[in-house]
């Protein structure tokens, strides 16, 4: 059954680790921008709320599919790691799920709520977005420190929580720059500048803390010749930060030129940061505790799961592309049927 796979005991776990990492990256970018748009309710005038929701309305549900896929892969392909990670992160995972549920309910109820009640659903949408973003950032900090407990780990988790939310605010503002026009687009440019600076500071903090948290990771980054080979990664990231910030100082341009630039640049920054983290923790799936191979299911099980993944993954990619093509262009004014 496994004759067609070279060294299935090692190859299949790596394939699933790659698929899980790809799913997480796509989720962080796609659901990151709609969480960011929700968090921006704190700064936007109320008359902009409907257009902001309209810019993400056709996409947010599909975006969250990537989170389901990532957790599903973790559960079926790496059950031991799934138990270890979710046990250690039970509270922030619960907060994230409550936030996502609150957002989903608010999408529907704010559309039909009369008068003053709509303000409460707008606040619920904002609160759910912040809860989800902050909890994900806290989980990132806990993961970087190897799921340790203590006040140091707690405060580092809070730091990464607020920095990831700032990154989401930036990518959300970048999405609004691309999907809106007029006064809202101009406000989004200002939000994106602030979010880029705070998110960039958070990325620097995480990048410095990761090697300091582990002697193994420190050696992977700062040994020779690795330090020379890896130098382009932070250099490209810094270059992208500068390029995006310069572009934001010029936007909006006549004819809506380069309105897509901040979002594409933000996606590239997220991707480079994710690549650095993946290199840091490889071959561990639970930092310092479980490797990818140690925590993987049996090769025979992974082969069956891979067959199903070959059907499910193209389907998710296909309808995601389809949705973004159908609802492309600028967001229209939000209207609801009776």
Image (cartoon, helix red, strand yellow):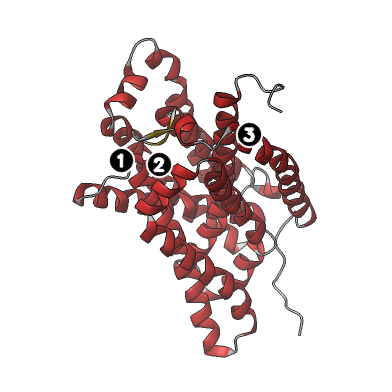
Q: Residue at x 65, y 43 (%)?
A: 258
Instruction: Check disc 3 and report the residue beneath it.
Output: 300
Q: Residue furthest top?
A: 225
Q: Please indicate whether residue 147 sits to the left or right of residue 120 in the image.
A: left
Nearer the observer, 62 or 34: 62
Q: Please indicate whether residue 203 sits to the left or right of residue 336 in the image.
A: left
Sequence-wise first label, 3 or 1 = 1
Please report contact status of discs 3 and 1: CB closer than 8 Å, yes or no: no
**Label at residue 37:** none
**Label at residue 200:** 2
**Label at residue 145:** 1
**Occupied quadrant, residue 247:** top right
* Residue 187 visible in image: no
Q: Please indicate whether residue 228 sits to the left or right of residue 108 in the image.
A: left
Please report contact status of discs 2 and 3: CB closer than 8 Å, yes or no: no
Nearer the observer, 78 or 150: 78
Task: State how many labels appear.
Answer: 3
Nearer the observer, 118 or 84: 84
Q: Please indicate whether residue 193 sits to the left or right of residue 61 in the image.
A: left
The Cα atoms of the two marked residues, 2 and 1, are separated by 20 Å
260 over 173 or under it: above or below: above
Which numbered disc, 2 or 3, marks the residue closer to the eye?
3
The Cα atoms of the two marked residues, 2 and 3, are separated by 43 Å
Sequence-wise first label, 2 or 1 = 1
Q: Residue at x 48, y 52 (%)?
A: 168
Image quarter of the C terminus: bottom right
Question: SS for tag 1?
Answer: loop
The Cα atoms of the two marked residues, 3 and 1, are separated by 33 Å
Which numbered disc, 2 or 1, marks the residue closer to the eye?
1
Crowd rating for badge 1 (residues with CA inside 10 Å; few <14, some 14–19, many 20+): many
């Amino acid at each position: 059954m496994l004759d067609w796979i070279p060294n299935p005991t090692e190859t299949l776990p790596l394939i699933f680790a790659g698929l899980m990492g790809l799913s997480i990256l796509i989720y962080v970018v796609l659901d990151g921008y709609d969480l960011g748009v929700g968090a921006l309710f704190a700064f936007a005038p109320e008359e902009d709320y409907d257009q902001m929701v309209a810019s993400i309305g056709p996409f947010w549900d599909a975006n969250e599919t990537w989170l389901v896929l990532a957790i599903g892969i973790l559960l079926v392909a790496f059950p031991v790691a799934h138990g270890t990670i979710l046990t250690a992160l039970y509270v922030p995972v619960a907060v994230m799920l409550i936030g996502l549920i609150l957002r989903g309910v608010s999408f529907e109820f704010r559309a039909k709520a009369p008068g003053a009640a709509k303000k409460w659903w707008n606040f619920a949408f904002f609160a759910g977005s912040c809860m989800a973003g902050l909890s994900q950032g806290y989980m990132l900090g806990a993961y970087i420190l190897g799921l340790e407990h203590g006040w140091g780990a707690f405060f580092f988790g809070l730091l990464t929580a607020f920095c990831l939310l700032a990154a989401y605010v930036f990518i959300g503002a970048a999405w609004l720059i691309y999907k809106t026009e007029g006064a809202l687009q101009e406000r989004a440019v200002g939000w994106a500048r602030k979010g880029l600076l705070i998110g960039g500071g958070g990325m620097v903090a995480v990048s410095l803390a990761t090697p300091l948290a582990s002697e193994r990771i420190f050696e992977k980054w700062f040994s020779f010749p690795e330090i020379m080979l890896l130098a382009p990664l932070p250099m490209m990231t810094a270059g992208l930060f500068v390029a995006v910030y310069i572009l934001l100082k010029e936007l909006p341009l006549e004819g809506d030129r380069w309105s897509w630039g901040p979002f594409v640049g933000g996606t590239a920054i997220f991707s480079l940061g994710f690549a650095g983290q993946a290199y840091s923790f490889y071959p561990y799936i639970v930092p310092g505790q479980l490797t990818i191979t140690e925590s993987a299911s049996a090769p025979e099980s992974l082969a069956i799961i891979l067959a199903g993944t070959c059907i499910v993954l193209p389907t998710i990619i296909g309808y995601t592309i389809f949705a973004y093509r159908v609802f492309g262009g600028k967001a229209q004014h939000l209207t609801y049927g009776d």
